[in-house]
Image (spheres, helix red, strand yellow):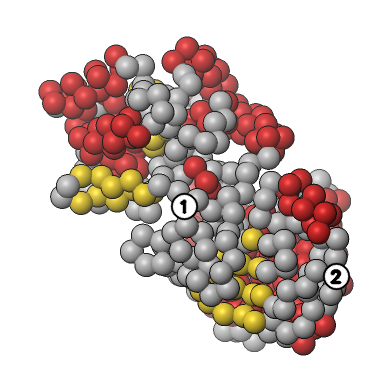
Amino acid sequence: MRFAAAAGALRPTAATLLLFSPPQSRRRLLLSLPFARRRRHSSSTATVAEEEDGIESKAARRRRARDSPEGLLRHQLDMCSRHADLTTALRLYDDALSTASPVPLSLHHYNCLLYLCSNAAASASDPDAARRGFDIFARMEADGVQPNEATLTSVARLAAATRDPAMAFSVVRRMAQAGIPPRLRSYGPALFAYCDAKDADGASQVEAHMDASSVVPEEPELAALLRVNADNARADEVYRLLHRTRSLVRQVCDTTAQVVEAWFQSDAAAEVGVDQWDPSKVKEGVVKGGGGWHGQGWLGKGQWRVGRSHVHKDGTCQRCGERLVCIDIDPSETHNFANSLCELASKREVKEDFLTFQNWLRRHGPFDAVIDAANVGLYNSKAFSFSQVNSVVNAIQKITRSKKLPLIILHRNRVNNGPAKAPYNQKILESWRNAGALYATPPGSNDDWSAPFLFNRITVRLTFSGRGPTLHMPPPYSIVIQESEDGTWHVPTTTGDDIEKPREWICATRKKSK
């Protein structure tokens, strides 16, 4: 929720800010629209009149483009893309190049063809797909059709499918040189191809290029980098990447967890580390980092004892007895995040709307809690429930320090239409308005912003039962990768949710020295 996240960013109160993001995805509403009135003149009559006047309307131009050979080919290739039908797409392409009835090919045509070829080459479903894809790209360049990011990403995928990571990487560099901003998907083919080839140096070059382009890796990319560096016994790089994963990923999926476990169980992991270290420097690193990690390198020596564990509600690992900590949000990080979020919201939203929200928040805030009312109102419900939201509002009000109603973010359409018109719901809305707690986001605004890492410690999870809402308060420790002062590591996984089933953690420890 853009406005809800921005509310926290404008007045960051790490100890009390609460965000609600129930796991149920938002439902789409299908609106039945009345039939349009029949125009006084039929479309054919209007078209004739337009042609007689020598004026072509936009609708007529669209019809002409759609019914042209180029338009028909575009539609057919779109259908091929939808159904992953490379065979038909290549036949249409060959027919378009025939001298009997040639069809000029546009960027969209070429992108559909290259997308299909790259998919087939990556899945090895067509042994000739890569060759055809490269031929099509060569024809595109010969025709003078300028590629875009989607084009070059498909070419990079073709190169990766032929196990040529260097070529895939060169395509990304060409993209950057041409002023086309690469995206994460642009780097994927080269990065994964280097990792599959166990070329850690090549993968590191791709990662560095991503950083220079301000492209942030996600868990699959981080897992691949961890794996290739672990396989090459590059302990320092594994250490760095574990911390990068800590900062970018809250919990790791099972695939990543297996990579982490394999590293700690390896001979290379057993050999790295120091028997003695300076506790004061380690402590200094912990304080500087906000807790939960020190960044001083591998501590300890010898084989690691690795296994899955659960964490007691007080934060104690049930396998090694280590107590996990609550990681503070660095004030400068919070400030930078708030500024970045506000800047991004101003760009993505109508600026006047966001400024209106800022002014409203200054008049009515601060708030101890923020509720994403759309998600709460649709949680386990086919229709939006105002009473369900109100029950959560009341529950939150009881536990906050100020006993003030939380900030309720809800789209203006839900405030003015549908169930909102019912008398009982009108009373609920009026009580929120009178308390200065309801902000209705304007049409065109997206209320789905989130900041999972920063709000890790201040997110309250929500479940409903016949007795009403149950608020699951954050644990007294942070659910992120933690490195202790004696060198022990704990990595949270996505197995378990800490409500119905305890979360599994990877616990990696070894002989403790000083």
| Residue 285 in picture, x, y percent from top left | 78, 52
In the picture, measured across the screen, residue 44 lies left or right of residue 380, that is right
Where is mark 1, residue-wise? 475
In the picture, measured across the screen, residue 232 lies left or right of residue 18, that is right
**Which residue: 25% across, 19% down?**
431
| Residue 57 in picture, x, y percent from top left | 48, 30
Q: Residue 130 versus residue 89: which sits nearer the camera? A: 130
Residue extending furthest left? 423
**Which residue: 68% across, 35% down?**
331
**Which residue: 29% across, 26% down?**
415
| Residue 141 in picture, x, y percent from top left | 79, 60
Q: Which amino acid does label 2 sit on?
A: Gln
| Residue 218 in picture, x, y percent from top left | 64, 59
Mark 2 secondary-structure assignment? loop
Q: Is residue 497 above or below residue 211?
A: below
Q: What residue type is labelled 1?
A: Pro
Mark 1 secondary-structure assignment? loop
Where is mark 2, residue-wise? 276
Can you see residue 9? yes
Given this view, does label 1 or label 2 mark the residue nearer the observer? 2
**Which residue: 51% across, 59% down?**
315
Earlier in the chain: of badge 1 and badge 2, it is 2
* Mark 1 Cα-neighbour bin, 10 Å: few <14, some 14–19, many ≥20: some
In the picture, measured across the screen, residue 405 lies left or right of residue 202, that is left
Q: Residue 316 versus residue 460: which sits nearer the camera? A: 316
Quadrant housing residue 430: top left
